Amino acid sequence: MDTMKNFQNRLFVIFLIAISFSFLGYSQDNTTKELTFDVERTYTPLSISKAKLDNANTLEDLNRHYETSWVKEYISVQILTIHNGETKKAMSKSDILTEEQKELMAIADVNTEITVNVQYLPDNILEDKDIKKNDFSFLVYPESEATYLDGKEQLKLYLKEKAIDKIPEGIFINYGMAAIKFTVNEDGEINNVHIFESSKDEKVDKLLVHTIENMPCWKPAEYANGVKVKQEFALIVGNMENCMINLLNINKGVLARND
C-alpha cells in the first residue's frame, strides 16, 4: 500500500514539473522582444575630427587606408587646401607631414576638402618602375555634431511612440532591417528623407519616412568658428548585423539607441 502511495506521489511531482516547464516555455514563446533601433550619424568615406587632424604626423594619420608598404621612393607629396577662398599647397617627399603642410591644413576653410596628391615609385619586383599616383581627399567634421534639441532620450521616446511601437510583429525576422537616411540642414530642419534599405513592407516604410519627415527641428552641426553645416543621419530598425549596415558608414552609438 505504501509502495503504491509513494509511486502516486512521484507521478504527481513529475506531473507538476512537466506543467511548470510547459508554462515556462509558453511564457517565453509569448514574450515580445523589444525591437532594436538606432539613430546614427553617417560619414563621408574619408572624414576625421579636428582633434585627429591636429595630432596627425603621417599620411596614415589622415587616411587609415593609406599603404606605405606600396612605396619604395616618394617623388612628391602635395597637400592642397583652401584658405580664405584661395587654393594653397605645400610639398614634401615623404609620408611624414611637414610643419608647413600641417599649418595649411590647420587654417583650411571649414567644410572644404583637403586633398593629398602622392607620386611615388612602387616597391615591387616587377620591371615596371613607372611613377604611380595615390590621391585622396578628406573632410574635417565639425566640433559640435547636430543633436536633437530635447536630447537623445526624448528622441528615442519620440521614435518609439510615433513609429517603433506601431510596427507589427514579424516584420523584422532573421536579418531583416530598414534604414531611413535624412539630412539635418544648417537651420536644424529635416530634409532629404529617403529609404536606404527597405523593410520589405510598404506600410512600415511609409510610417518610418513619415515619422522622420515630421520630426521636430534639431540643433545643427557647428564648427568652432560658428559656421553651421548640414549633416546626414540614418534611422536603423531591425537586425544590426545586416550586411547593408556597413554601407551606411556609421559611427555607432552617437544618438539614440534601444536594444
Image: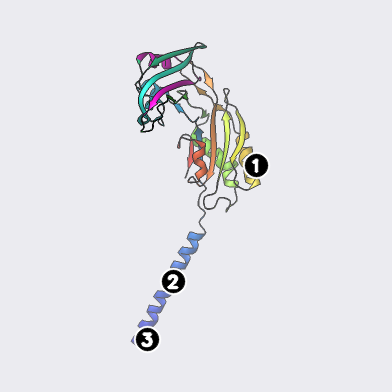
Amino acid residing under circle 2: Ala
Q: Residues within 10 Å of mark 2 (few under 14, many from 20)?
A: few
Cβ atoms under marks 2 and 1 closer than 8 Å: no
* Residue 104 located within the stretch drawn in magenta: yes
Mark 3 = which residue?
4
Is residue 22 visible to the viewer in this orientation of the structure?
yes
**Sequence order check, earlier mark of 2 and 3:** 3
Image spot of residue 107 (x, y percent)? 44, 14
* Residue 103 located within the stretch drawn in magenta: yes
Image spot of residue 256 (x, y percent)? 49, 37
Amino acid residing under circle 1: Lys
Span of residues in magenta = 99-122
Instruction: Work out whether residue 165 or residue 97 is closer to the camera in this orientation and state it.
Output: 97
User: What residue is at 37 percent from the left and 78 percent from the top?
Assistant: 10
Mark 2 = which residue?
18
Quarter of the image for the N terminus: give it: bottom left
User: What residue is at 51 percent from the left and 38 percent from the top?
Assistant: 247
Q: Residues within 10 Å of mark 3 (few under 14, many from 20)?
A: few
**Sequence order check, earlier mark of 2 and 1:** 2
